[in-house]
Amino acid sequence: MAPGRRIAGMLLCRSGESRVAFAAREVATIELPRDMVRPVGAARQAFGEPEGAERVLVADSGEAVGVDALEIDAEPLEVLPVPVLLRTMGGGSLRGFVLARGMLWPLVSLVDFGRYLAPPEEVT
Amino acid sequence: MASTETETRQTYLVFACGSSWYAVPAECAAEVVSFPELTRVPGAPMHLMGVFAHRGEVIPVVDMGMLVSGESEPTRRAVLVRLPRGTLALTASRVAGVSHVEGRLEPLGPSGVHLHLRGPARSAQRDVAVIEPEGLFDHLSQGG
């Protein structure tokens, strides 16, 4: 993501003790974990915390990420670039950082983060 | 810089994390900061404590204790190391100041982070590990 870029419309999500943000335009639906037909990775896993989620964000292409809680932020915010050191972390899903609600949030791609967290497919 | 040099002409910022002392070239040590509550990064290794925003830049904080010895040293202070590719913060429980370093500047180990720590060296009667910043940056970029 280019330096100085702004984003409007985000889902600010809590995952255990940590937080993560998604562009709202990437989220097709918000589901309950019990309604998912296949296992979904939880954002907590990426922070080394026990699995668990209260809601699941689902992309148009099917990738999904479980989170504990979420709120919508409509304000346009500047996206701070990802430091070179962090470019490969989270499966390369980091798109930048945003300052919202007085805190810094990692902004990740729902599709790439969903792929990074996806449980391995069972071989039948 | 020759690996067998007995005294460097460079000056170094000397700091400690726990009981271990380190020296980083003064030319790339930008400042010593007290960092705020950190934002954790998804998928980050244990030694990457998190990030904070500083003058419009997102700075990763590296726990030197965890990185080098696998034991975390609680502190809210860090040395900002500024390199052409970016800035990183190395945790520091104490900062001794800027001085010269004497000793051999050979890798302290054959692989991992120790490949980018040099010595044995001394500064102001202390044993120090001299940090080779670009190599350390590469090492951390590859996940540490």
Image (cartoon, rainbow, N blue to C red):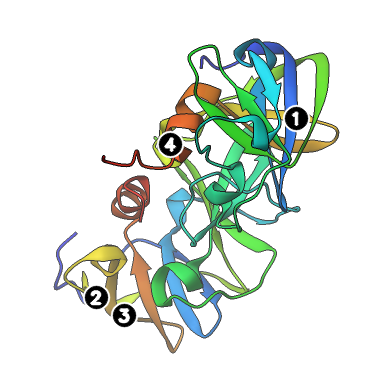
Residue B77, image quadrant: bottom right
Residue B12 point in image, percent of width and height: 43, 64
Q: Which type of secondary structure does the marked residue at label 2 adopt?
A: loop
Counting residues from the start of the chain, the first of labels 4 and 1 encountered is 1
Element assignment for label 1: strand
B78 left or right, relative to B1: right
The chain letter for the residue carrying disc 1 is A
Q: Residue at x 26, y 41 (%)?
A: A123
From the image, tell me which residue sits under label 1.
Answer: A12
Q: Which residue is mark 4?
A: A116
Q: Left or right: where does residue B104 sit relative to residue B91?
A: left
Q: Kindly report which numbered mark, 2 or 4, lies closer to the viewer in this rendering.
A: 4
Q: Whole-Å distance between the Cαs marked 1 and 3? A: 48 Å
Q: Position of residue A76 (x, y in %)?
A: 77, 12
Q: Identify the chain of the residue marked 4, using the numbered disc in the image.
A: A
Q: Nearer the viewer, mark 2 or mark 1?
A: 1
Residue pointed to by mark 2 = B108
Callout 2: residue from which chain? Answer: B
Placement of A1 over or under A66, stated as above or below = above
User: Would you call the spot at circle 3 few (<14 residues within 10 Å), some (14-19), or many (20 or more)?
Assistant: many
